[in-house]
Image (cartoon, helix red, strand yellow):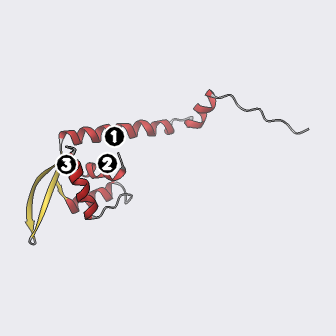
Amino acid sequence: MRAPTFFTLAALLDGPLHGYGIIKRAEGLSEGAVHMTAGTLYGALERLSREGLVVEEGQEIVAGRARRYYRLSDEGHAALDAEAERMSKAAAVVQKPEGVAASTARRRPAKAHPRPA
């Protein structure tokens, strides 16, 4: 799962949001690493809706414009949980006290370097 998708889904963990709210929450959760335009977000929300990960929760009219709200579906929660678990396991590999290099070095014999005469 790519970061924009992950943070879009994560933005909906606390409940339904409209598009601008999702953009701002995703940006905050990612500490600015994910920045989406409205066009990008709504394309992603349509895809996520087709995949069953988000559901349109309703809409309201604000200043003459329709504001659609989205929420996570049960499948969206499951996908987000699975991705968070995958990321946690991946991070644990490199956060071990001995690190990846040390564990890899134990499995491979060290190369002998000739000493200068």
Q: Nearer the viewer, mark 3 or mark 2?
A: 3
Residue 111 visible in the shown view: yes
Q: Nearer the viewer, mark 1 or mark 3?
A: 3
Q: Say the numbered circle drawn on residue 6.
A: 2
96 lies left or right of 109: left
Which quadrant holds residue 27?
bottom left
Contact (Cβ within 8 Å) of mark 2 with mark 1: yes
Q: Which residue is mark 1?
A: 83
Residue 24 visible in the shown view: no
Residue visible at 45% across and 40% down in the picture: 91
Residue visible at 64% across and 29% down in the picture: 108
Provide the secondary structure element on which disc 2 rests: helix
Residue type pointed to by label 3: Ser
Q: Earlier in the sequence, mark 2 or mark 1?
A: 2
Provide the secondary structure element on which disc 3 rests: helix
Which quadrant holds residue 20?
bottom left
Q: Earlier in the sequence, mark 1 or mark 3?
A: 3
Measure how far apart labels 2 and 1 are at the Cα level: 8 Å
58 lies left or right of 75: left
- The correct choice, above or below, for 63 with respect to 52 in the image is below
82 lies left or right of 97: left
Q: Residue furthest bottom?
A: 63
Mark 2 Cα shell of 10 Å, populated few (<14), some (14-19), many (≥20):
some
Q: Earlier in the sequence, mark 3 or mark 2?
A: 2
The percent coordinates of residue 51 (x first, y second) are: 22, 44
- 49 or 69: which is nearer to us? 49
The percent coordinates of residue 53 (x first, y second) are: 21, 44
Q: Quadrant of the C terminus?
A: top right
Mark 3 Cα shell of 10 Å, populated few (<14), some (14-19), many (≥20):
some
- 116 or 92: which is nearer to us? 116
The percent coordinates of residue 21 (x first, y second) are: 22, 60
The percent coordinates of residue 99 (x first, y second) are: 55, 37
